[in-house]
Structures are given as structure tokens and as C-alpha cells.
């Protein structure tokens, strides 16, 4: 399915609000959310709007790939197997399903999004930018912010594990870059791509004017060593649909190649990569599952509303 060919001139189904309180919410809708950070806390308006079984908090279990939902608090669901949680999601009240990914880890919101789309629900994704990042008091070059404690290393995202064919030797590595250059460095060490097969994407414009400069400086060593600075591409850091369309262009330039998309940048970019992977079987998602540092962000910035189902239907 091509999303861009027939819709290049259409505005993407995306709205931006200065705060979460200003987001208009559909009647008879459902909200799935997590509260991993200060900016993911629900405004009182949302709590008043979503009540009972229409307000569902997702909590990550201690074991990777498992979650609990407060409407079934005594049960733990596996996101890898997915059958039981699919059945539960199929029983949600009718209407739009809002998935707030702000406070959820990638390995949680990505399979939830896939399940909801498989169930043909009208899905809208919410994401709030951080107000500010926690500055690093003793930064080494390029380490401006204290974001992660450690990483679980690169392992498959539930429902997106794909077996590589022995004959599929042609591939292109597309890191969606963020501030943490150590993640890019580790990715290159593990994947060992040829330098000419690395095509980084930087979020421009960024959430803030200076963020792209921090991204370049944080990743400068690897960009220089691999000479991939010569092939850097750009997509709006806050728009999954902008990223999606860049990936379509890259795909047209690399037919027959396995596209390895490394989700080490913004959540909106990760969302765009996931949408692309859902329609292109020659895509592999790579993610290193960071353990986020407590208090790494303060306050909340703009809130984005992405009409995912609308976008996915635009090319049909």
C-alpha cells in the first residue's frame, strides 16, 4: 500500500495543541495510557471525559513484554503472544480509541497499536513533548542530557520479530537519530553495516530550535567515522507522516533491500517507522529498549494528535 502517491498534496491527519487540556476528544471514546513521566499525567478534563471502562491505564510488568491493564488488574498479559490481550481489546466499548504513547515504552505501545489496527478500531495516537530535558551537570562531548540509565540492547519488539532470510544479504540501515550518540555507536557495532549502507535521519525541524544541533553533535563521532554524514536525510521530529514519506522515497531508491529502521530518536519518528513496517514486509525494526532515567524530563510541551486509522486508509 502506498500512502504518498495519491495523497502528496493532502495535509497529514495531524493536529498540534499548546497543552493536553486543549485536545478535543470524541464522545463515547476510550483512552489507553501509561504514566511513566510527569508529562504523561492525565489532565482532570481527560479524567472527567473518560470514565469507568473507557479509561484504561497500562502498567508494564517486571518481565519484559508483559503488561497489566487496570480494568483487569489481576491478570498479566503477554504482548509477544498477544491472543489474550487481543480478546480484551476486542471487548472495549465502541468508538474512537485514543492511545497515549507519551508514558509508554516502545515495546508496549507498538504491539498495542498493531492489535488495535488489526481489530479495525478507529485509532488516534496522542503524544506530549517534554517541557525540558534534564541537563547533564558534567557532560562529556555531545552528552547534553541525562536520558537513560542503561539499555537492554537490541532485541525484537513484540509482534515485530522477523526471521532474516539467508539470501537477504542486501540491506540498508536507517537510524532515526536522537541525542544519545552511544545508541548509534552500539547499533553500528552490532549490525556491522558497510559505511555506504547507513542512511541516518535527523528530526528537522526539532521540538525546539536547537535540538537538531544537539543531535548532530551527540552523534558526530559515528557520523564522521562511517562518513554517513554525507547521506543524512531529514523529517519533522514531531510528525510520523513526514518520516513515513521519507521512508517511501528511500524505499524507491533501494528496491529489493531489507530496510533496518533503528528507533533511537523521537517517539513520533518511531510511530512513523512502525506504520511503514506494517505495510512493507521488507522492513525490520531495531530498538535497544532503554531504561529511562528518573526525572529525565520536566513539564509538558505541545500535545500532538495523530489520526492513525485515517492515514492508513488514505492509500486504499
Image: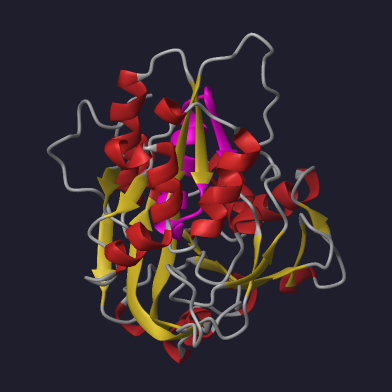
Q: Along the line of sight, which residue is nearer the eye, 71 or 154?
A: 154
Residue occupying the point 66% across, 45% down:
157
Q: Residue at x 63, y 48 (%)?
A: 111
Total numbered circles: 0
Left or right placement of residue 198 versus residue 311 in this view: right
**Left of 107 or right of it: where is 264?**
left
Compared with 124, 30 (above or below) is: below
Residue at the farthest top position: 167
Report the span colored magenta: 263-285
Residue 243 makes an appearance in the image: yes
The structure residue drawn at horizontal position 22% and vertical position 26%, both measured from the top left corner, is 5
The quarter in which the N terminus is drawn is top left
Location of residue 199 in the rendering, given as x and y in whole percent from the top left corner? 38, 35
Tell me if I can see residue 286 in this picture.
no
**Which residue, as the protein is rendered here, is positioned at the far left?**
9
Quarter occupied by residue 26: bottom left
| Quadrant of the snapshot with the C terminus | top left
Above/below status of 309 relative to 214 = above
Which of 276/172 is in front? 172
Asked if the magenta segment contains residue 86, the reply would be no
Q: Relative to 93, is 133 on the left or the right? A: left
Q: Position of residue 30 (x, y in %)?
A: 53, 66
172 on left or right of 148: left
In this figure, which colouring scheme has been used for the structure? secondary structure
Please tell me whether residue 3 is drawn above or below residue 114 in the rendered image.
Answer: above
Is 284 inside the magenta-drawn segment?
yes
Q: Residue 206: x percent and y percent?
A: 28, 63
Q: Position of residue 288 (x, y in %)?
A: 64, 52
**Residue placed farthest to the bottom in the image?**
44
Amino acid at each position: 500500500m502506498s500512502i504518498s502517491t495519491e495523497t502528496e498534496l493532502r495535509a497529514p491527519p495531524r493536529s498540534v495543541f499548546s497543552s493536553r487540556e486543549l485536545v478535543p476528544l470524541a464522545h463515547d471514546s476510550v483512552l489507553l495510557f501509561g504514566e511513566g513521566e510527569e508529562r504523561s499525567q492525565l489532565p482532570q478534563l481527560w479524567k472527567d471525559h473518560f470514565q469507568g471502562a473507557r479509561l484504561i491505564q497500562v502498567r508494564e510488568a517486571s518481565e519484559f513484554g508483559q503488561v497489566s491493564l487496570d480494568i483487569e488488574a489481576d491478570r498479566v498479559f503477554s504482548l509477544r503472544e498477544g491472543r489474550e490481550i487481543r480478546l480484551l481489546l476486542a471487548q472495549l466499548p465502541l468508538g474512537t480509541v485514543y492511545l497515549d504513547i507519551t508514558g509508554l515504552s516502545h515495546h508496549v505501545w507498538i504491539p498495542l497499536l498493531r492489535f488495535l489496527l488489526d481489530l479495525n478500531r478507529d485509532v488516534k495516537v496522542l503524544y506530549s513533548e517534554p517541557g525540558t530535558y534534564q541537563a547533564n551537570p558534567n557532560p562529556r562531548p555531545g552528552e547534553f542530557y541525562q536520558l537513560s540509565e542503561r539499555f537492554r540492547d537490541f532485541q525484537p519488539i513484540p509482534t515485530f520479530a522477523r526471521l532474516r532470510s539467508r539470501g537477504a544479504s542486501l540491506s540498508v540501515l536507517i537510524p532515526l537519530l536522537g541525542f544519545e550518540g552511544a545508541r548509534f555507536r552500539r547499533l553500528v557495532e552490532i549490525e556491522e553495516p558497510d559505511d555506504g549502507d547507513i542512511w541516518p535521519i535527523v528530526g528537522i525541524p526539532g521540538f525546539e530550535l536547537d535540538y537538531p544541533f544537539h543531535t548532530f553533535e551527540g552523534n558526530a563521532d559515528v557520523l564522521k567515522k562511517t562518513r554517513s554524514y554525507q547521506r543524512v536525510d531529514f523529517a519533522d521530529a514531531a510528525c510520523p507522516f513526514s518520516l513515513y514519506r521519507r521512508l517511501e522515497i528511500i524505499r524507491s531508491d533501494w528496491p529489493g533491500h531489507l530496510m533496518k529502521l533503528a528507533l533511537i530518536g523521537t517517539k513520533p519518528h518511531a510511530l512513523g517507522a512502525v506504520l511503514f513496517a506494517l505495510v512493507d514486509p521488507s522492513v525490520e525494526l531495531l530498538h535497544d529498549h532503554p531504561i529511562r532515567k528518573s526525572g529525565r524530563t520536566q513539564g509538558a510541551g505541545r500535545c500532538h494528535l495523530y489520526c492513525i486509522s485515517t492515514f492508513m486508509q488514505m492509500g486504499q
